[in-house]
Image (tube, rainbow, N blue to C red):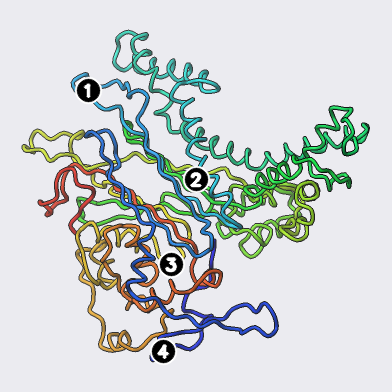
Amino acid sequence: MHARQSPGDHGVRKYSTKQATFAIPVRRQTPGDPSFKVITPLSQAEVDTRLRAHERSTKIERPPGACLVARYDTNTVASNDPIEDKHAEVIVERDRGVDEPLPKSTQPPDAPRGDLCFFTVMDGHGGPDTSTMLSEKLVAFVALELDKVFRETGEYAKMGRSHVSTTSAIWHSLFGGDKNAASHRLATSALDGDPAIVQRAIVKGFRGLDKEIVTTPLELLKQCELSLAAAKTSHIAAPGEATNSLSSLAHTIWPSNISGQASSSPFVTVSQTTAQDAMLPALSGSCALMLYVDSARRDLYVANTGDSRAVAGYWDERNSRWEVEALSVDQTGRNPEELKRIQREHPSDENDTVIQRGRVLGGLEPTRAFGDARYKWDASTQKRLYDAFWPGGYTKLRPPPRNLKTPPYVTAEPVVAYRKVTLAQPEAHDAHHASPQTAAPQRQLRFIIMASDGLWDLMSNQEAVGLVAGHLAGIRGTVRAADLQQRCFQPATPAPAPATSERAEDEKPQHPLNKSPNHLQSFTFEDDNLSTHLLRNAFGGAARERVQGLLAIPSPESRRYRDDITVNVILFHTTQPARGDTKAPVSDPARAKL
Protein backbone atom coordinates (compact mmCIF):
# COMPACT_ATOMS: atom_id res chain seq x y z
CA MET A 1 0.00 0.00 0.00
CA HIS A 2 0.98 3.62 -0.55
CA ALA A 3 3.67 3.44 -3.20
CA ARG A 4 4.76 6.99 -3.85
CA GLN A 5 7.55 6.73 -6.39
CA SER A 6 6.22 7.92 -9.73
CA PRO A 7 6.89 5.27 -12.38
CA GLY A 8 9.34 6.49 -14.93
CA ASP A 9 10.39 9.60 -13.02
CA HIS A 10 13.39 7.94 -11.40
CA GLY A 11 14.70 4.61 -10.26
CA VAL A 12 15.23 3.09 -13.70
CA ARG A 13 18.31 2.37 -15.76
CA LYS A 14 19.00 2.43 -19.47
CA TYR A 15 16.64 0.79 -21.91
CA SER A 16 17.74 -1.38 -24.81
CA THR A 17 15.40 -1.39 -27.79
CA LYS A 18 17.35 -4.27 -29.36
CA GLN A 19 17.14 -6.54 -26.35
CA ALA A 20 13.76 -5.18 -25.21
CA THR A 21 14.92 -5.23 -21.59
CA PHE A 22 15.45 -2.60 -18.94
CA ALA A 23 17.02 -2.51 -15.49
CA ILE A 24 15.72 -1.32 -12.14
CA PRO A 25 17.68 -0.70 -8.93
CA VAL A 26 17.28 -3.30 -6.17
CA ARG A 27 18.28 -3.44 -2.55
CA ARG A 28 21.39 -5.53 -1.91
CA GLN A 29 20.99 -8.35 0.58
CA THR A 30 24.76 -8.85 0.86
CA PRO A 31 27.67 -6.60 -0.27
CA GLY A 32 28.39 -8.77 -3.29
CA ASP A 33 24.84 -8.77 -4.67
CA PRO A 34 24.06 -6.80 -7.86
CA SER A 35 22.52 -3.37 -7.38
CA PHE A 36 20.07 -3.74 -10.25
CA LYS A 37 17.75 -6.31 -11.83
CA VAL A 38 17.14 -6.78 -15.55
CA ILE A 39 13.47 -6.91 -16.52
CA THR A 40 12.02 -8.34 -19.71
CA PRO A 41 8.70 -6.67 -20.57
CA LEU A 42 5.65 -8.88 -20.92
CA SER A 43 4.19 -9.66 -24.30
CA GLN A 44 0.81 -8.14 -25.14
CA ALA A 45 -0.83 -11.54 -24.66
CA GLU A 46 0.76 -11.84 -21.21
CA VAL A 47 -0.46 -8.35 -20.33
CA ASP A 48 -4.02 -9.25 -21.30
CA THR A 49 -3.86 -12.44 -19.25
CA ARG A 50 -2.49 -10.60 -16.20
CA LEU A 51 -5.02 -7.79 -16.40
CA ARG A 52 -8.03 -10.05 -16.93
CA ALA A 53 -7.17 -12.86 -14.52
CA HIS A 54 -9.42 -11.59 -11.71
CA GLU A 55 -11.97 -9.49 -13.57
CA ARG A 56 -15.64 -10.13 -12.95
CA SER A 57 -18.77 -8.49 -14.33
CA THR A 58 -22.05 -9.06 -12.49
CA LYS A 59 -25.41 -8.08 -13.95
CA ILE A 60 -28.17 -7.72 -11.36
CA GLU A 61 -31.10 -9.86 -12.46
CA ARG A 62 -33.96 -8.49 -10.35
CA PRO A 63 -37.58 -7.50 -11.01
CA PRO A 64 -37.99 -3.98 -12.40
CA GLY A 65 -37.64 -1.40 -9.66
CA ALA A 66 -36.17 -3.80 -7.11
CA CYS A 67 -32.55 -2.68 -7.34
CA LEU A 68 -30.99 0.65 -8.27
CA VAL A 69 -27.81 -1.13 -9.31
CA ALA A 70 -27.80 -2.58 -12.82
CA ARG A 71 -24.30 -4.06 -12.95
CA TYR A 72 -20.94 -3.94 -11.25
CA ASP A 73 -17.49 -4.74 -12.64
CA THR A 74 -14.63 -5.68 -10.31
CA ASN A 75 -10.95 -6.42 -10.78
CA THR A 76 -7.70 -6.53 -8.85
CA VAL A 77 -4.05 -6.47 -9.87
CA ALA A 78 -1.45 -7.38 -7.27
CA SER A 79 1.88 -5.76 -6.57
CA ASN A 80 2.49 -7.34 -3.17
CA ASP A 81 2.81 -11.10 -2.83
CA PRO A 82 0.35 -11.98 -1.43
CA ILE A 83 -1.94 -9.15 -2.43
CA GLU A 84 -3.11 -7.01 0.50
CA ASP A 85 -6.24 -5.62 -1.19
CA LYS A 86 -9.62 -7.31 -0.73
CA HIS A 87 -13.18 -6.58 -1.75
CA ALA A 88 -16.68 -7.87 -1.01
CA GLU A 89 -20.13 -7.32 -2.50
CA VAL A 90 -23.48 -8.31 -0.99
CA ILE A 91 -27.02 -7.60 -2.25
CA VAL A 92 -30.01 -8.58 -0.10
CA GLU A 93 -33.73 -7.91 -0.22
CA ARG A 94 -35.44 -5.83 2.44
CA ASP A 95 -37.29 -7.80 5.07
CA ARG A 96 -40.21 -5.47 4.47
CA GLY A 97 -41.05 -2.66 2.11
CA VAL A 98 -41.08 1.04 2.71
CA ASP A 99 -44.47 2.21 3.98
CA GLU A 100 -44.32 5.85 2.93
CA PRO A 101 -47.29 8.25 3.05
CA LEU A 102 -47.93 8.22 -0.71
CA PRO A 103 -51.18 7.77 -2.66
CA LYS A 104 -52.13 4.12 -2.93
CA SER A 105 -52.14 4.34 -6.71
CA THR A 106 -48.38 4.78 -6.66
CA GLN A 107 -47.84 1.66 -4.56
CA PRO A 108 -48.70 -1.47 -6.60
CA PRO A 109 -49.54 -4.41 -4.33
CA ASP A 110 -46.86 -6.56 -5.96
CA ALA A 111 -44.20 -3.82 -5.92
CA PRO A 112 -40.75 -5.15 -4.93
CA ARG A 113 -39.54 -4.33 -1.45
CA GLY A 114 -36.29 -2.93 -2.72
CA ASP A 115 -32.76 -4.29 -2.43
CA LEU A 116 -30.03 -3.24 -0.02
CA CYS A 117 -26.61 -3.21 -1.70
CA PHE A 118 -23.22 -3.31 0.00
CA PHE A 119 -19.95 -2.80 -1.89
CA THR A 120 -16.61 -2.70 -0.10
CA VAL A 121 -12.96 -2.18 -1.00
CA MET A 122 -10.26 -2.95 1.57
CA ASP A 123 -6.69 -1.70 1.14
CA GLY A 124 -4.42 -3.59 3.52
CA HIS A 125 -0.91 -2.75 4.66
CA GLY A 126 1.65 -4.65 6.69
CA GLY A 127 0.15 -7.93 5.50
CA PRO A 128 -3.22 -9.21 4.27
CA ASP A 129 -4.60 -10.29 7.66
CA THR A 130 -6.67 -7.21 8.50
CA SER A 131 -8.10 -6.72 5.02
CA THR A 132 -8.98 -10.42 4.84
CA MET A 133 -10.92 -10.19 8.09
CA LEU A 134 -12.72 -7.07 6.87
CA SER A 135 -13.72 -8.80 3.64
CA GLU A 136 -15.32 -11.54 5.73
CA LYS A 137 -16.92 -9.49 8.52
CA LEU A 138 -17.35 -5.78 7.77
CA VAL A 139 -20.60 -6.04 5.82
CA ALA A 140 -22.05 -8.33 8.50
CA PHE A 141 -21.13 -5.92 11.31
CA VAL A 142 -22.79 -3.01 9.51
CA ALA A 143 -25.80 -5.16 8.58
CA LEU A 144 -26.23 -6.10 12.24
CA GLU A 145 -26.53 -2.44 13.21
CA LEU A 146 -28.79 -1.61 10.27
CA ASP A 147 -31.05 -4.53 11.17
CA LYS A 148 -31.53 -2.96 14.60
CA VAL A 149 -32.46 0.29 12.88
CA PHE A 150 -34.98 -1.42 10.59
CA ARG A 151 -36.51 -3.38 13.48
CA GLU A 152 -36.15 -0.50 15.95
CA THR A 153 -34.60 -2.69 18.61
CA GLY A 154 -31.87 -2.10 21.17
CA GLU A 155 -30.81 1.53 21.48
CA TYR A 156 -32.90 2.39 18.41
CA ALA A 157 -36.22 1.42 20.06
CA LYS A 158 -36.43 4.65 22.03
CA MET A 159 -35.34 6.65 18.98
CA GLY A 160 -38.09 4.99 16.97
CA ARG A 161 -40.84 5.93 19.42
CA SER A 162 -39.62 9.52 19.56
CA HIS A 163 -39.22 9.71 15.79
CA VAL A 164 -42.73 8.36 15.08
CA SER A 165 -44.33 10.67 17.62
CA THR A 166 -42.72 13.76 16.10
CA THR A 167 -43.23 12.73 12.48
CA SER A 168 -46.89 11.72 12.89
CA ALA A 169 -47.65 15.03 14.58
CA ILE A 170 -46.15 16.90 11.63
CA TRP A 171 -48.07 14.69 9.18
CA HIS A 172 -51.33 15.33 11.05
CA SER A 173 -50.77 19.10 11.12
CA LEU A 174 -50.12 19.18 7.38
CA PHE A 175 -52.68 16.72 6.05
CA GLY A 176 -55.11 16.09 8.91
CA GLY A 177 -56.60 12.68 9.55
CA ASP A 178 -56.11 10.24 12.38
CA LYS A 179 -52.86 10.67 14.30
CA ASN A 180 -52.79 7.00 15.21
CA ALA A 181 -53.17 6.01 11.57
CA ALA A 182 -50.33 8.33 10.64
CA SER A 183 -48.18 6.80 13.36
CA HIS A 184 -48.92 3.29 12.10
CA ARG A 185 -48.07 4.32 8.55
CA LEU A 186 -44.72 5.78 9.57
CA ALA A 187 -43.73 3.34 12.30
CA THR A 188 -42.05 0.80 10.05
CA SER A 189 -39.98 3.24 8.06
CA ALA A 190 -39.08 6.24 10.18
CA LEU A 191 -35.59 5.29 11.33
CA ASP A 192 -34.19 3.63 8.22
CA GLY A 193 -35.19 6.73 6.27
CA ASP A 194 -33.33 9.07 8.62
CA PRO A 195 -29.82 9.65 7.20
CA ALA A 196 -28.38 10.68 10.57
CA ILE A 197 -29.49 7.43 12.20
CA VAL A 198 -28.30 5.27 9.31
CA GLN A 199 -24.94 7.05 9.35
CA ARG A 200 -24.71 6.41 13.09
CA ALA A 201 -25.39 2.70 12.55
CA ILE A 202 -22.70 2.42 9.87
CA VAL A 203 -20.18 4.12 12.14
CA LYS A 204 -21.06 1.71 14.95
CA GLY A 205 -20.57 -1.25 12.65
CA PHE A 206 -17.12 -0.06 11.63
CA ARG A 207 -16.04 0.72 15.18
CA GLY A 208 -17.46 -2.53 16.49
CA LEU A 209 -15.37 -4.65 14.16
CA ASP A 210 -12.20 -2.71 14.90
CA LYS A 211 -12.89 -3.10 18.62
CA GLU A 212 -13.08 -6.86 18.13
CA ILE A 213 -9.81 -6.85 16.16
CA VAL A 214 -7.90 -4.77 18.69
CA THR A 215 -9.32 -6.14 21.95
CA THR A 216 -9.31 -9.88 21.20
CA PRO A 217 -5.54 -10.20 21.81
CA LEU A 218 -5.95 -8.18 25.01
CA GLU A 219 -8.64 -10.55 26.28
CA LEU A 220 -6.37 -13.52 25.60
CA LEU A 221 -3.54 -11.74 27.40
CA LYS A 222 -5.76 -11.08 30.39
CA GLN A 223 -6.75 -14.74 30.60
CA CYS A 224 -3.14 -15.78 30.26
CA GLU A 225 -1.89 -13.46 33.00
CA LEU A 226 -4.69 -14.44 35.39
CA SER A 227 -3.86 -18.08 34.81
CA LEU A 228 -0.18 -17.45 35.47
CA ALA A 229 -0.90 -15.53 38.64
CA ALA A 230 -3.04 -18.37 39.95
CA ALA A 231 -0.51 -20.99 38.91
CA LYS A 232 2.24 -19.34 40.96
CA THR A 233 0.35 -20.17 44.15
CA SER A 234 -0.33 -23.76 43.15
CA HIS A 235 1.81 -26.86 42.76
CA ILE A 236 2.41 -27.73 39.11
CA ALA A 237 2.48 -31.46 38.61
CA ALA A 238 5.51 -33.15 37.14
CA PRO A 239 5.10 -35.40 34.10
CA GLY A 240 3.18 -38.52 35.11
CA GLU A 241 2.02 -36.92 38.35
CA ALA A 242 -1.63 -36.13 38.96
CA THR A 243 -2.56 -32.48 38.49
CA ASN A 244 -3.78 -31.35 41.90
CA SER A 245 -5.26 -27.92 41.15
CA LEU A 246 -7.64 -26.46 38.64
CA SER A 247 -5.43 -23.42 38.08
CA SER A 248 -2.49 -25.68 37.27
CA LEU A 249 -4.56 -27.49 34.70
CA ALA A 250 -5.75 -24.19 33.22
CA HIS A 251 -2.18 -22.93 33.00
CA THR A 252 -1.19 -25.76 30.66
CA ILE A 253 -3.01 -24.13 27.73
CA TRP A 254 -0.59 -21.18 27.70
CA PRO A 255 2.91 -21.06 26.20
CA SER A 256 5.40 -22.73 28.50
CA ASN A 257 8.12 -20.11 27.95
CA ILE A 258 6.15 -17.52 29.94
CA SER A 259 6.83 -19.20 33.27
CA GLY A 260 10.16 -20.62 32.20
CA GLN A 261 8.95 -24.15 32.82
CA ALA A 262 8.77 -26.87 30.21
CA SER A 263 5.46 -28.41 29.39
CA SER A 264 4.57 -31.38 27.25
CA SER A 265 0.92 -30.36 27.01
CA PRO A 266 -0.43 -30.54 23.45
CA PHE A 267 -2.49 -27.44 24.21
CA VAL A 268 0.56 -25.17 24.41
CA THR A 269 1.24 -24.96 20.69
CA VAL A 270 -2.46 -24.69 19.85
CA SER A 271 -2.95 -21.82 22.28
CA GLN A 272 0.09 -19.88 21.12
CA THR A 273 -0.95 -20.31 17.50
CA THR A 274 -4.44 -19.11 18.35
CA ALA A 275 -3.05 -16.06 20.11
CA GLN A 276 -0.76 -15.22 17.21
CA ASP A 277 -3.64 -15.63 14.76
CA ALA A 278 -5.59 -13.13 16.85
CA MET A 279 -2.67 -10.70 16.91
CA LEU A 280 -2.03 -10.65 13.16
CA PRO A 281 -5.18 -8.70 12.15
CA ALA A 282 -4.41 -6.26 14.96
CA LEU A 283 -0.75 -5.75 14.01
CA SER A 284 -1.34 -5.33 10.28
CA GLY A 285 -3.86 -2.75 9.11
CA SER A 286 -6.36 -1.86 6.44
CA CYS A 287 -8.34 1.01 5.03
CA ALA A 288 -11.98 0.34 4.19
CA LEU A 289 -14.44 1.95 1.80
CA MET A 290 -18.12 0.97 1.81
CA LEU A 291 -20.98 1.95 -0.47
CA TYR A 292 -24.45 1.20 0.93
CA VAL A 293 -27.46 1.67 -1.35
CA ASP A 294 -31.07 1.52 -0.14
CA SER A 295 -32.93 0.98 -3.41
CA ALA A 296 -36.42 1.52 -2.02
CA ARG A 297 -35.55 4.90 -0.55
CA ARG A 298 -32.99 5.83 -3.22
CA ASP A 299 -30.54 6.59 -0.44
CA LEU A 300 -26.81 6.22 -0.92
CA TYR A 301 -24.14 6.20 1.79
CA VAL A 302 -20.37 6.14 1.38
CA ALA A 303 -18.35 5.28 4.49
CA ASN A 304 -14.61 5.80 4.32
CA THR A 305 -11.87 4.83 6.74
CA GLY A 306 -8.48 5.65 5.21
CA ASP A 307 -7.49 6.75 1.73
CA SER A 308 -9.42 4.59 -0.70
CA ARG A 309 -11.81 6.70 -2.75
CA ALA A 310 -15.29 6.70 -4.25
CA VAL A 311 -16.01 8.96 -7.23
CA ALA A 312 -19.40 9.45 -8.90
CA GLY A 313 -20.13 10.13 -12.55
CA TYR A 314 -23.25 12.24 -13.16
CA TRP A 315 -24.80 12.98 -16.53
CA ASP A 316 -25.93 16.62 -16.88
CA GLU A 317 -28.82 16.34 -19.32
CA ARG A 318 -29.33 20.08 -19.74
CA ASN A 319 -25.72 20.80 -20.71
CA SER A 320 -25.00 17.42 -22.32
CA ARG A 321 -21.85 16.79 -20.34
CA TRP A 322 -20.51 14.73 -17.48
CA GLU A 323 -19.88 15.91 -13.93
CA VAL A 324 -17.49 14.43 -11.38
CA GLU A 325 -18.08 14.26 -7.64
CA ALA A 326 -15.75 12.75 -5.07
CA LEU A 327 -17.92 10.99 -2.49
CA SER A 328 -15.07 10.51 -0.02
CA VAL A 329 -12.07 12.45 1.22
CA ASP A 330 -8.62 10.88 1.59
CA GLN A 331 -7.79 10.61 5.28
CA THR A 332 -4.03 11.02 5.53
CA GLY A 333 -1.63 13.23 7.44
CA ARG A 334 -1.60 15.55 4.43
CA ASN A 335 -5.29 16.31 4.94
CA PRO A 336 -5.40 19.56 6.99
CA GLU A 337 -8.66 18.55 8.69
CA GLU A 338 -7.21 15.23 9.79
CA LEU A 339 -4.09 16.96 11.10
CA LYS A 340 -6.23 19.33 13.19
CA ARG A 341 -8.37 16.46 14.47
CA ILE A 342 -5.41 14.41 15.65
CA GLN A 343 -3.75 17.43 17.24
CA ARG A 344 -6.98 18.17 19.15
CA GLU A 345 -7.07 14.61 20.49
CA HIS A 346 -3.58 14.77 22.02
CA PRO A 347 -1.66 17.09 24.35
CA SER A 348 -0.35 20.27 22.77
CA ASP A 349 3.26 19.24 23.37
CA GLU A 350 2.70 16.51 20.73
CA ASN A 351 1.53 18.89 18.00
CA ASP A 352 4.80 18.56 16.12
CA THR A 353 5.10 14.77 16.43
CA VAL A 354 1.61 13.31 15.91
CA ILE A 355 2.04 13.91 12.16
CA GLN A 356 5.54 13.88 10.68
CA ARG A 357 6.22 14.01 6.94
CA GLY A 358 2.50 13.54 6.35
CA ARG A 359 2.38 10.30 8.37
CA VAL A 360 1.07 9.36 11.81
CA LEU A 361 4.09 9.47 14.15
CA GLY A 362 6.17 9.52 10.98
CA GLY A 363 5.17 5.99 9.95
CA LEU A 364 1.56 5.35 8.93
CA GLU A 365 0.09 7.29 6.03
CA PRO A 366 -3.67 6.84 6.59
CA THR A 367 -4.92 8.56 9.73
CA ARG A 368 -7.89 6.21 10.00
CA ALA A 369 -7.52 2.46 9.70
CA PHE A 370 -8.62 -0.89 11.07
CA GLY A 371 -6.00 -2.78 13.05
CA ASP A 372 -2.67 -0.94 13.26
CA ALA A 373 -2.73 -1.63 16.99
CA ARG A 374 0.87 -0.44 17.26
CA TYR A 375 -0.71 3.02 17.15
CA LYS A 376 -3.57 2.07 19.52
CA TRP A 377 -1.95 0.03 22.32
CA ASP A 378 0.50 1.60 24.75
CA ALA A 379 4.10 0.40 24.63
CA SER A 380 3.92 -1.65 27.84
CA THR A 381 0.86 -3.55 26.59
CA GLN A 382 2.63 -4.34 23.34
CA LYS A 383 5.62 -5.71 25.23
CA ARG A 384 3.41 -7.89 27.42
CA LEU A 385 1.63 -9.28 24.35
CA TYR A 386 4.86 -10.14 22.58
CA ASP A 387 6.41 -11.66 25.71
CA ALA A 388 3.33 -13.83 26.21
CA PHE A 389 2.56 -14.93 22.68
CA TRP A 390 5.43 -13.98 20.38
CA PRO A 391 8.79 -14.11 22.19
CA GLY A 392 11.30 -11.76 20.60
CA GLY A 393 8.68 -10.08 18.46
CA TYR A 394 8.73 -6.82 20.40
CA THR A 395 12.08 -5.86 18.91
CA LYS A 396 12.27 -8.09 15.82
CA LEU A 397 8.80 -7.78 14.27
CA ARG A 398 6.88 -4.54 14.75
CA PRO A 399 8.01 -2.51 17.74
CA PRO A 400 5.97 0.50 18.85
CA PRO A 401 6.54 3.66 16.80
CA ARG A 402 8.67 6.43 18.18
CA ASN A 403 6.93 9.19 20.16
CA LEU A 404 4.13 6.81 21.19
CA LYS A 405 2.94 8.69 24.29
CA THR A 406 -0.85 8.98 24.40
CA PRO A 407 -2.43 6.29 22.19
CA PRO A 408 -4.64 5.73 20.34
CA TYR A 409 -3.44 7.84 17.42
CA VAL A 410 -5.45 6.03 14.75
CA THR A 411 -9.20 5.36 14.60
CA ALA A 412 -11.37 3.15 12.42
CA GLU A 413 -14.31 5.53 12.68
CA PRO A 414 -15.43 6.33 9.13
CA VAL A 415 -16.59 9.58 7.62
CA VAL A 416 -20.01 8.80 6.14
CA ALA A 417 -21.40 10.81 3.22
CA TYR A 418 -25.06 10.72 2.22
CA ARG A 419 -26.64 11.38 -1.17
CA LYS A 420 -30.14 10.99 -2.57
CA VAL A 421 -29.95 9.06 -5.84
CA THR A 422 -31.37 10.90 -8.84
CA LEU A 423 -32.22 8.87 -11.91
CA ALA A 424 -33.64 9.71 -15.32
CA GLN A 425 -37.42 9.49 -15.62
CA PRO A 426 -39.45 8.25 -18.62
CA GLU A 427 -40.02 10.94 -21.19
CA ALA A 428 -43.55 12.36 -21.18
CA HIS A 429 -45.42 11.96 -24.49
CA ASP A 430 -47.17 15.26 -23.89
CA ALA A 431 -45.05 18.03 -22.46
CA HIS A 432 -48.19 19.78 -21.18
CA HIS A 433 -48.84 16.86 -18.83
CA ALA A 434 -45.31 16.76 -17.45
CA SER A 435 -44.98 17.53 -13.75
CA PRO A 436 -42.04 18.32 -11.45
CA GLN A 437 -42.33 14.76 -10.13
CA THR A 438 -41.96 13.17 -13.59
CA ALA A 439 -39.52 15.63 -15.16
CA ALA A 440 -36.01 14.27 -15.52
CA PRO A 441 -33.55 15.78 -13.04
CA GLN A 442 -30.78 17.92 -14.44
CA ARG A 443 -28.10 15.67 -12.99
CA GLN A 444 -28.48 11.90 -13.04
CA LEU A 445 -26.23 9.45 -11.22
CA ARG A 446 -24.90 6.94 -13.74
CA PHE A 447 -22.01 5.19 -11.99
CA ILE A 448 -19.68 5.16 -9.00
CA ILE A 449 -16.01 4.14 -9.12
CA MET A 450 -14.61 2.64 -5.92
CA ALA A 451 -10.88 1.97 -5.80
CA SER A 452 -7.94 1.58 -3.47
CA ASP A 453 -5.39 4.37 -3.51
CA GLY A 454 -3.20 2.49 -5.99
CA LEU A 455 -5.51 3.61 -8.80
CA TRP A 456 -5.67 7.21 -7.63
CA ASP A 457 -1.87 7.38 -7.44
CA LEU A 458 -1.90 6.92 -11.23
CA MET A 459 -5.12 8.60 -12.34
CA SER A 460 -7.21 11.66 -11.47
CA ASN A 461 -10.92 11.57 -10.60
CA GLN A 462 -11.79 13.30 -13.87
CA GLU A 463 -9.70 10.92 -15.96
CA ALA A 464 -11.40 7.92 -14.36
CA VAL A 465 -14.91 9.28 -14.90
CA GLY A 466 -14.06 10.22 -18.48
CA LEU A 467 -12.79 6.73 -19.21
CA VAL A 468 -15.95 5.07 -17.89
CA ALA A 469 -18.21 7.61 -19.60
CA GLY A 470 -16.43 7.11 -22.91
CA HIS A 471 -16.67 3.34 -22.59
CA LEU A 472 -20.41 3.51 -21.91
CA ALA A 473 -20.82 5.73 -24.97
CA GLY A 474 -19.31 3.01 -27.13
CA ILE A 475 -15.87 4.47 -27.82
CA ARG A 476 -13.33 1.91 -29.01
CA GLY A 477 -9.73 2.17 -30.09
CA THR A 478 -7.21 4.84 -29.10
CA VAL A 479 -8.24 8.32 -27.97
CA ARG A 480 -6.01 11.20 -26.92
CA ALA A 481 -6.58 12.03 -23.26
CA ALA A 482 -7.16 15.68 -24.07
CA ASP A 483 -9.81 14.79 -26.66
CA LEU A 484 -11.64 12.54 -24.22
CA GLN A 485 -11.66 15.21 -21.52
CA GLN A 486 -13.02 17.78 -23.97
CA ARG A 487 -15.76 15.47 -25.22
CA CYS A 488 -16.87 14.46 -21.73
CA PHE A 489 -16.65 17.69 -19.78
CA GLN A 490 -16.52 20.51 -22.36
CA PRO A 491 -18.38 19.09 -25.36
CA ALA A 492 -18.89 22.48 -27.01
CA THR A 493 -15.15 23.20 -27.17
CA PRO A 494 -13.14 21.27 -29.78
CA ALA A 495 -9.83 19.91 -28.58
CA PRO A 496 -6.80 21.40 -30.36
CA ALA A 497 -4.80 19.12 -32.64
CA PRO A 498 -1.29 18.30 -31.43
CA ALA A 499 1.50 20.43 -32.83
CA THR A 500 3.98 18.89 -35.27
CA SER A 501 6.73 18.94 -32.62
CA GLU A 502 4.43 17.16 -30.16
CA ARG A 503 3.60 14.44 -32.69
CA ALA A 504 7.30 14.00 -33.41
CA GLU A 505 8.05 13.71 -29.71
CA ASP A 506 5.33 11.10 -29.38
CA GLU A 507 7.03 8.98 -32.02
CA LYS A 508 10.45 9.00 -30.35
CA PRO A 509 11.60 5.76 -28.67
CA GLN A 510 10.76 5.95 -24.98
CA HIS A 511 11.92 4.04 -21.93
CA PRO A 512 9.10 1.59 -21.15
CA LEU A 513 8.45 3.14 -17.73
CA ASN A 514 8.48 6.74 -18.90
CA LYS A 515 5.11 8.42 -18.72
CA SER A 516 4.14 10.59 -21.68
CA PRO A 517 3.50 14.28 -21.05
CA ASN A 518 -0.14 15.02 -20.30
CA HIS A 519 -0.69 16.65 -23.69
CA LEU A 520 0.55 13.49 -25.44
CA GLN A 521 -1.11 10.88 -23.25
CA SER A 522 -3.54 8.53 -25.02
CA PHE A 523 -6.09 6.11 -23.66
CA THR A 524 -7.13 2.78 -25.12
CA PHE A 525 -10.65 1.34 -25.20
CA GLU A 526 -10.34 -2.42 -25.69
CA ASP A 527 -11.67 -4.13 -22.55
CA ASP A 528 -15.29 -5.07 -21.89
CA ASN A 529 -14.87 -4.99 -18.12
CA LEU A 530 -14.91 -1.38 -16.86
CA SER A 531 -12.51 -2.05 -13.99
CA THR A 532 -10.03 -3.72 -16.33
CA HIS A 533 -10.45 -0.73 -18.64
CA LEU A 534 -9.44 1.63 -15.81
CA LEU A 535 -6.52 -0.55 -14.74
CA ARG A 536 -5.04 -0.82 -18.22
CA ASN A 537 -5.20 2.94 -18.70
CA ALA A 538 -3.80 3.63 -15.25
CA PHE A 539 -0.72 1.60 -16.17
CA GLY A 540 -0.21 3.44 -19.45
CA GLY A 541 -3.19 3.01 -21.74
CA ALA A 542 -2.16 3.26 -25.37
CA ALA A 543 1.53 3.35 -24.36
CA ARG A 544 1.81 -0.43 -24.55
CA GLU A 545 5.52 -0.51 -23.72
CA ARG A 546 4.83 1.20 -20.41
CA VAL A 547 2.07 -1.25 -19.50
CA GLN A 548 4.24 -4.22 -20.50
CA GLY A 549 7.14 -2.89 -18.44
CA LEU A 550 5.21 -2.02 -15.28
CA LEU A 551 3.44 -5.37 -15.12
CA ALA A 552 6.69 -7.27 -15.73
CA ILE A 553 8.36 -5.99 -12.55
CA PRO A 554 8.00 -8.70 -9.88
CA SER A 555 7.27 -8.32 -6.18
CA PRO A 556 8.76 -6.87 -4.02
CA GLU A 557 10.49 -4.48 -6.45
CA SER A 558 7.14 -3.66 -8.07
CA ARG A 559 6.09 -1.78 -4.92
CA ARG A 560 8.41 1.06 -5.90
CA TYR A 561 6.42 1.60 -9.08
CA ARG A 562 2.84 0.52 -8.45
CA ASP A 563 0.62 -0.55 -5.58
CA ASP A 564 -1.97 -3.29 -5.25
CA ILE A 565 -5.05 -1.98 -7.02
CA THR A 566 -8.68 -2.98 -6.56
CA VAL A 567 -11.44 -1.35 -8.61
CA ASN A 568 -15.21 -1.71 -8.56
CA VAL A 569 -17.38 0.22 -11.03
CA ILE A 570 -21.07 0.22 -10.05
CA LEU A 571 -23.57 1.11 -12.77
CA PHE A 572 -27.00 2.45 -11.87
CA HIS A 573 -30.21 1.87 -13.81
CA THR A 574 -31.46 4.55 -16.14
CA THR A 575 -35.05 4.58 -17.33
CA GLN A 576 -34.45 6.39 -20.59
CA PRO A 577 -31.66 6.57 -23.17
CA ALA A 578 -29.57 9.69 -23.18
CA ARG A 579 -30.49 12.29 -25.75
CA GLY A 580 -29.33 11.30 -29.22
CA ASP A 581 -28.75 7.66 -28.26
CA THR A 582 -32.09 6.21 -29.29
CA LYS A 583 -30.74 2.69 -29.72
CA ALA A 584 -30.08 2.26 -26.02
CA PRO A 585 -32.79 0.07 -24.45
CA VAL A 586 -34.77 1.46 -21.56
CA SER A 587 -33.30 -0.98 -19.05
CA ASP A 588 -29.71 -0.62 -20.26
CA PRO A 589 -27.20 0.68 -17.69
CA ALA A 590 -25.98 4.24 -18.10
CA ARG A 591 -25.30 5.10 -21.70
CA ALA A 592 -24.75 8.67 -22.78
CA LYS A 593 -23.92 10.56 -25.91
CA LEU A 594 -20.65 12.40 -25.48
* 3D distance between C-alphas at marks 4 and 3: 28 Å
Q: Are marks 4 and 3 in contact (CB under 8 Å)?
A: no
Where is mark 1, residue-wise? Answer: 110
Res 501 quadrant in image: bottom left
Give the structural element (helix, strand or loop) at label 4: loop
Callout 2: helix, strand or loop? Answer: helix
Question: Which mark is in front, 2 or 4?
Answer: 4
- Nearer the N terminus, badge 4 or badge 3? 4
Closer to the eye: label 2 or 1:
2
**Observer-nearest residue: 290 or 321?**
290
Tell me the residue at 48%/42% (across/down).
416
Task: State which quadrant residue 252 falls in.
Answer: top right
CA separation, marks 2 and 3?
25 Å
Q: Is residue 594 left or right of residue 54?
A: left
Horizontal placement of 494 versus 273: left or right?
left
Question: Which dot marks residue 135?
Answer: 2
Task: Give the Cα distance between marks 2 and 1.
Answer: 35 Å
Q: Which residue is identified by label 4? A: 19
In the rendered image, which residue does mark 3 sit on?
A: 458
For marks 2 and 3, give the one nearer the viewer.
2
Q: Residues within 10 Å of mark 2 (few under 14, many from 20)?
A: some
Alpha-carbon neighbours of circle 1 within 10 Å: few (<14), some, or many (≥20)?
few
Q: Position of residue 296 (x, y in %)?
A: 31, 31
Q: Secondary structure at mark 3?
A: loop
Tag 3: amino acid = Leu
Task: Report the Cα–Cα distance between label 2 and label 4.
Answer: 43 Å
Q: CA distance from mark 1 to mark 4?
A: 67 Å
In x, y percent, where is residue 271?
A: 72, 41
Compared to 408, does 127 lie above or below? Answer: below
- SS type, badge 1: loop
